[in-house]
Amino acid sequence: QVQLRESGGDSVQAGGSLRLSCVGSGYWHSRYCMGWYRQVPGKAREGVAIIYNADGTTDYADSVKGRFTISTDNPQKMLYLQIHSLKPEDTAMYYCAADASRCTVVAGSFPQFHYWGQGTQVTVSA
């Protein structure tokens, strides 16, 4: 079992950048699928980006392609989400996640993860 804790959320102006971090503790599998999701109050949690630890393969939601970059540092048990050109619609609670049965986005559908962090808030003002 792995425990996850996010950090790096902040209030920023549109066009700005942030780097979200997620540190793992406990069991960290080098072949985990890892991901970032986000959620706005009253709406379902949506997948943002995923990465397969074993080979670094990534995939993204269409709404963030070209602006978000997911990466890992396996020896440090870290997961990152670099965000550029932030938009007000990026405002959400961002969650990191680990361990999914598949590591692909199929027809826009992200995989289901077993382990989740508590979230870090990103607020983007116009």
Image (cartoon, rainbow, N blue to C red):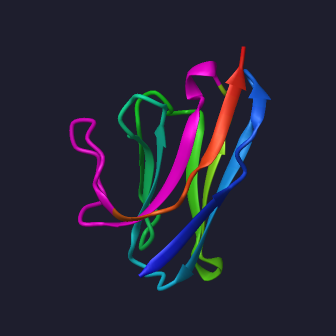
Left or right: residue 114 versus residue 4 is left
Q: Looking at the image, which residue is at 41% across and 30% down?
A: 62
Q: Is residue 90 above or below residue 27?
A: above
Left or right: residue 7 versus residue 93 is right
- Which percent across, then down, holds residue 112? 28, 56
Q: Nearer the viewer, residue 81 or 46?
A: 46
Q: Is residue 87 above or below residue 2?
A: above
Q: Is residue 89 above or below residue 83?
A: above
Name the quarter where the C terminus is drawn. Answer: top right
Please, which residue is most extreme toward the bottom here?
27
Residue 43 in view of the camera: yes
Q: Which residues are magenta?
A: 87-113
Q: Is residue 119 above or below residue 53?
A: above
- Which percent across, then down, holds residue 109? 26, 41
- Which percent across, then down, holds residue 92? 56, 34
Residue 16 in view of the camera: no
Verify whether residue 97 appears in magenta: yes
Q: Looking at the image, which residue is at 51% across and 74% down?
A: 3
Left or right: residue 119 versus residue 20 is left
- Which percent across, then down, holds residue 93? 56, 41
Q: Looking at the image, which residue is at 57% across and 52% down?
A: 119
Name the quarter where the N terminus is drawn. Answer: bottom left
